[in-house]
Amino acid sequence: MTENGIDMRLEKIRIICFYSLLFILMNSCLLKNTQGPPKYKESIDLSGLEIYEQKLIKRVDSGRKSWLIASGKPCDNCDANLSIYLIPIVNQNHTDTLFTSYVYPGKIYDYETDSLIFESRLYIGDCFKVGQQKMVWLQKEKTNDGSWIESIYEIQFFENNFKESHIYDFEKTRFNYATNLQTEFCLEVPGIEQTSAP
């Protein structure tokens, strides 16, 4: 066989391999798209939790541990602010009754003066590094002297637990967060406007 003949056969093999790989990738994407989002309300019992006006936001799976992230209030038919709840899943159908609450993203106004005193944005998922599940609040709070303090509140999920960090060196870290934000793997929870507690 001539050298040209060998080159043509190698080229055909390359083309066959390329289209075979493309076919596998396309089927994988189609399968992922047809599965749809998990139906948390049908599979996990939240009735035992003292969280009212519940709304599920996202499920986080990290190693052997999973959590539900939901919004809600600590009382029924009350004026309490909406909060974010982090709820551990103890088995396939039930959650732990011990959960943690956090500030809901958006703007908070002083109930007496109606002036803005707190503002935040919340991101959940692989927002800043693929494979690293986090909840991140980018926030600023008004102090008593009228100045503003910017900070980052972060929850990072590990195989069996999670770790909370409050970062005040905002100027040093803000650029990294802004430039690394990956919306394809990340959910931003839309903010709302609320008033502070009396």
Image (tube, rainbow, N blue to C red):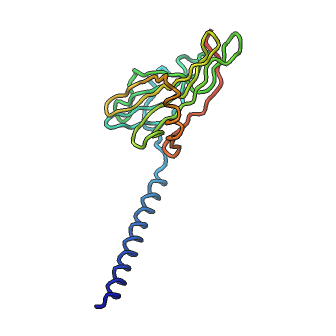
The number of numbered badges drawn on the structure is 0
Please tell me which residue is depicted at 52% across the width and 39% down the height of the picture: 187
Task: From the viewer's side, name the closer residue of 76 and 14.
Answer: 14
| Residue at the far left in the pictured view | 1
Taking the image as shown, residue 100 lies to the left or right of residue 54, namely left
**Image quadrant where one finds the C terminus:** top right
Task: In the rendered view, tell whether residue 18 sits above or below residue 167.
Answer: below
Task: From the viewer's side, name the closer residue of 43 and 145.
Answer: 145
Taking the image as shown, residue 44 lies to the left or right of residue 74, namely left
Please tell me which residue is depicted at 38% across the width and 31% down the height of the picture: 89
**Image quadrant where one finds the N terminus:** bottom left
Q: In the figure, residue 8 lies in which quadrant?
A: bottom left
Residue 186 in the image, given as x and y percentages of width and height? 50, 41
Taking the image as shown, residue 171 lies to the left or right of residue 20, namely right
Task: In the rendered view, tell whether residue 40 sits above or below residue 141.
Answer: below
Task: From the viewer's side, name the closer residue of 51 and 158.
Answer: 158
Residue 67 in the image, given as x and y percentages of width and height? 41, 32
